[in-house]
Structures are given as structure tokens and as C-alpha cells.
């Protein structure tokens, strides 16, 4: 079935003329028809638009276009609802944008289209990417394809569930504190968060601008490398994107990691780690050693402060970024006697509880009198956290860690306990604070029920080549990534 293929497999089929992009796109749409009532990965999708792009790709293929020129030619890629696609709804999992339709393409979407991808669908997410379970979506809950009574992780839960359930070939997500890596781990796919500045954020609706980064969710590591090559690069529309050469990431996938040094942070040996997750990570560490990597202990002494630091900086930036949703410029409007009442009513009706909680917290830490005590201090601790990583990377090529402390939990289990939910990010958040890159790959399953577990590799700033190389070598020596949830078959 074409919807089950990876990007590289589908590209081969298309190039050899054994399949058409229309058939591949149709296969994804058929799978959506079949499983969406149980999964709910999408908020919406445009069938005619997807098929028209597929037909254009088939025409280009017939005209001699190749995947060397356009690496994603004919490949259906679905998009998290926080990235702007021209002519498509853009809601960020929220009600506040109303019936807003994006008037332009994000830079990553322009790049996907230039590479020939069939860009389709709006994937569900926690409202404004705030959450770890996709339960904070204003639309509906997304369910984990491995066990539909459980969450898919978040905030890119729709992206992870859609990839895991073969409703698309690959998906884009965004990661502010773990939102690509954690749902990838919980749904059994590959999730890559690039270094800050590697991929343009133009057209990504901002949650916390100094932490946000667009990345991808894929079925294997090679696909992540293919997508990163397409997405990366400096962009005049995003002054935080960095003018560094984009590597040929796929060329680093040699399978040979002999002599590379991996660091295990001693501070990540925490009590809350699920025993089955621990077992899977230990086995992954042993496998890296079998492949010839050297594993040593490293220290990240400021780890304990990461969650507190993140929730000050992320909420501060969010409170400023979300001020633009005012009922005047775009989206929902609830009228009032004067502009202030209109503003209050619109935001009262348009934002959900978690978004309001964060705006309150962020406004508080930025307010005069508290700014120095909270925000400024958090910025200083952030530098210490980044320095911890830079120091560790003087002796190791990458850091290994669990992606999430537990496998997927039950829907509703943590919904009323925000602090419990925030702890789900304990292993992912530091990478965003430090601006480094990270990838989560499948490394095992819990027994009953059978739920995916992910291992995370963290790399130097702009060290994507190295973590992709290591992740790929591990993946090729294991079979975890080949397993499919019962429902997708
Ligand atoms: N779960 C974290 C939060 O709620 C991270 C979210 C993200 O990466 N977008 O903020």
C-alpha cells in the first residue's frame, strides 16, 4: 500500500513509473477515510487541492523531472495547523482565529512545494502548541494509533498520529519544548527538531519565538534527512535564520559510527522514569556500543532548573506574541461597548484554559517589579543550561537520553494537573533552551499494552549531520521502526 511507504521508497516507485502521485495521494486519503474516526489527526483536509497537486507532480514526472532535482516530487506531506499554507485554514488548534485563511505560504511550505511535495491537510495540535498531549486542541482530542484510549503526545500530536497511522508519508511539526520529539516517541515515529536558526520560522505562528523551531515527523531517519535538506537554509524573511551551508544530510547516513562518543547525562537518571522506558534506553545504549560507539557519562548540572526556566521564558514570549489576537485584525470578534471590552470578550471566548494560564503567567513574569526576579533570572539560567551542553559537547559527539519519561498515558489522566503535564518535557525542553538539535527514534515497546518508546539523540548547534548519522546506524541495526500499529494495517 502506497500510503505505508517512506519518502525514499515512494520516490523510487514514482521514478520507476510503478506508481503515480495521484495513487499515493489517493491511498493517503483512503486511509484517512478508514481510520480518522478513530484517530482524529486532522482538523481538515482539502481533497481536490491535494489531488490537483498530485496530478501536477505526475505531469512533471512524465515530463522528465527527477527526484535529484525535486526530492519530494509527488510525495504527500501533511502540515501542523500552526504553519501557514496559502489558501488553507490556519487555526493553531484554537478558536480565536475563527475562519481565517492564510494569504501566504510559510517559507518551509514554499520549499516543500518547490521540491514537488503534495502539501495537504491541517494537523491537529494543542492550542498554540501549548501542551504535551493534544488534549488542549479547541477542535477535538487526537488519539494514539497504538491504543486509541491514549494520547498521541503533543503538541504535534496530529502530525505524529497521522504519520504512525500511515495517513500521510511524512508531516511537519513545530518544537518549542519537545513538541516534535515527544509525540514522535509516543507514536513510534522519527521526530527531528533542528537547531535554532537552521529552518526559517517565517509563516510559523509564534508561540515562544526564541525557542520555536519547525521540524519533521517521518517513518525513518533517511526521510528526516531528506526533509531537513529541503527545509533548511537562511531566509531574508526570518532574521534569526542562520546563513550556514546546508549539508547533504543524506550523505552522512553511512551506517558507520565506530569511534563516535556518546554522552549519558547523569542528571537524567531520575526517579520518575518508567522502568520499561529505562530498560529500553539501557538496551539502546548497549546497541550503540555494539555498533562501535563509545558511551561515557557527562554532566549537565543545571538540568534541575530547565522546566522552571522554560515556563518563565516560554510564557513571557507567548504573552507578548499572543497579544496580536485582539479581535480587530483578524479571526474571531466578540463585540463590546468599547474596544477594551471587545478585546476582553474576544480573548475570553477565543482562548482555551491553558493558553489563558500561560498568558497570565507570562504577563506576570514580565511585569515591572517581577521582571528582574523572574524573567531576567530565567535568561541567565538559560545561558548556564546552554553552557552545560556546549561543555559536554567538547568531549562527546552527541548526548543520549530518553525522549519521554513514560509511554503514552490515558486521555484525561493528566488533563487537570498542568504541573504533571509539564514534567513530560523534562528530557526535551533543555535542547530548546540551548538552541541545539535533537532527534527521537523508536527504541522499543512497553509490554501490555504495547506502546512505543523513543530514544533521543541531542547534538551540537548545527550538528544535525552527526545525530542523523548515529540515529540512522541504530535504526538500521534494529527493527522497531518497521512495526505498525494494529489499526494502520
Ligand atoms: N509541552 C511543552 C509546552 O507545553 C512544549 C510545547 C512545544 O514544544 N510546543 O509548552
Image (cartoon, helix red, strand yellow):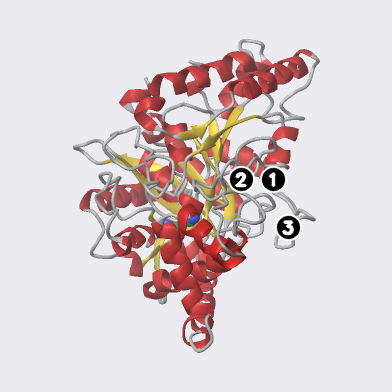
Please report the residue visible at 37 percent of the width from the left and 19 percent of the height from the top.
489
Q: Position of residue 224 (x, y in %)?
A: 56, 40
Q: Which of 478 and 310 is in front in this view?
A: 310
Classify 10 Å Cα crowding around label 2: few (below 14), some (14-19), many (20 and above). many
Left or right: where does residue 251 sit relative to residue 311?
right
Q: Are marks 1 and 2 in contact (CB under 8 Å)?
A: yes
Q: Between marks 3 and 2, how big is the CA–CA gap?
A: 14 Å
- The residue pinned by badge 2 equals 83
Report the front residue among 145 and 203.
203
Q: Is mark 3 on a helix, strand or loop?
A: loop
Q: Mark 3 points at which residue?
A: 238
Q: Name the residue under label 1.
A: 106
Q: Which residue is drawn at 41% across and 34% down?
A: 481
Among the 4 quarters of the image, the one containing residue 139: top left
The mark that comes first in sequence, 3 or 1, is 1
SS state under label 2: loop
Q: Residue furthest bottom?
A: 369
Reading the chain from its start, which is encountered first: label 3 or label 2?
2
Judge by depth and name the residue closer to the eye, 5 or 412: 412
Amino acid at each position: 500500500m502506497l500510503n505505508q511507504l517512506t519518502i525514499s521508497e515512494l520516490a523510487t516507485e514514482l521514478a520507476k513509473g510503478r506508481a503515480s502521485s495521484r495513487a499515493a495521494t489517493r491511498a493517503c486519503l483512503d486511509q484517512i477515510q478508514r481510520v480518522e474516526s478513530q484517530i482524529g489527526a486532522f482538523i481538515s483536509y482539502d481533497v481536490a487541492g491535494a489531488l490537483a497537486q498530485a496530478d501536477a507532480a505526475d505531469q512533471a514526472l512524465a515530463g522528465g523531472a527527477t527526484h535529484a532535482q525535486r526530492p519530494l516530487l509527488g510525495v504527500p506531506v501533511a502540515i501542523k495547523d500552526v504553519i501557514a499554507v496559502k489558501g488553507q485554514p490556519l487555526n493553531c488548534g484554537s478558536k480565536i482565529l475563527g475562519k481565517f485563511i492564510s494569504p501566504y505560504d510559510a517559507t518551509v511550505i514554499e520549499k516543500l512545494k518547490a521540491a514537488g511535495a503534495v502539501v495537504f491537510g491541517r494537523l491537529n495540535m494543542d492550542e498554540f502548541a501549548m501542551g504535551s498531549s493534544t488534549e488542549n486542541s479547541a477542535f477535538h482530542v487526537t488519539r494514539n494509533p497504538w491504543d486509541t484510549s491514549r494520547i498521541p503526545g503533543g503538541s504535534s500530536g496530529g502530525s505524529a498520529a497521522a504519520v504512525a497511522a500511515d495517513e500521510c508519508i511524512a508531516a511537519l511539526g513545530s518544537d518549542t519544548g519537545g513538541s516534535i520529539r515527544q509525540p514522535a516517541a509516543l507514536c513510534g515515529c522519527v521526530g527531528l527538531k533542528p537547531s535554532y536558526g537552521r529552518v526559517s520560522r517565517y509563516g510559523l505562528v509564534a508561540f515562544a519565538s526564541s525557542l520555536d523551531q519547525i521540524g519533521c515527523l517521518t517513518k525513518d531517519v533517511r526521510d528526516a534527512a531528506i526533509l531537513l535538506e529541503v527545509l533548511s537554509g537562511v531566509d531574508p524573511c526570518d532574521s534569526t535564520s542562520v546563513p550556514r551551508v546546508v549539508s547533504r544530510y543524506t550523505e552522512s547516513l553511512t551506517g558507520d559510527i565506530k569511534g563516535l562518543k556518546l554522552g549519558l547525562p547523569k542528571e537524567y537518571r531520575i526517579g520518575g522514569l518508567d522502568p520499561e522506558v529505562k530498560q529500553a534506553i539501557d538496551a539502546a545504549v548497549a546497541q550503540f556500543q555494539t555498533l562501535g560507539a563509545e558511551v561515557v557519562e557527562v554532566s549537565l548540572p543545571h538540568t534541575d532548573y530547565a522546566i522552571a526556566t522554560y515556563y518563565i521564558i516560554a510564557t513571557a514570549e507567548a504573552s507578548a506574541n499572543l497579544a496580536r489576537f485582539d479581535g480587530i485584525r483578524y479571526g474571531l470578534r466578540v463585540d463590546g461597548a468599547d474596544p477594551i471590552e471587545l478585546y476582553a470578550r474576544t480573548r475570553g471566548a477565543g482562548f482555551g484554559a491553558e493558553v489563558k494560564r500561560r498568558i497570565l503567567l507570562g504577563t506576570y513574569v514580565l511585569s515591572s517589579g517581577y521582571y528582574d526576579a523572574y524573567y531576567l533570572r530565567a535568561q541567565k539560567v538559560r545561558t548556564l543550561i546552554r553552557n552545560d551542553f556546549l561543555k559536554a559537547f567538547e568531549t562527546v559527539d552527541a548526548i543520549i537520553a530518553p525522549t519521554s519519561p513514560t509511554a503514552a498515558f490515558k486521555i484525561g489522566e493528566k488533563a487537570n494537573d498542568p504541573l504533571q503535564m509539564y514534567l513530560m518535557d523534562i528530557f526535551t525542553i533543555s535542547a530548546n533552551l540551548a538552541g541545539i538539535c535533537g532527534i527521537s527514534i523508536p527504541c522499543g515497546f512497553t509490554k501490555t499494552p504495547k506502546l512505543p518508546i523513543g530514544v533521543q539523540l541531542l547534538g551540537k548547534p548545527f550538528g544535525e549531520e552527526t545525530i542523523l548519522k548515529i540515529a540512522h546506524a541504530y535504526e538500521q541495526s534494529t527493527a522497531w521502526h518497521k512495526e505498525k500499529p494494529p489499526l494502520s494495517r
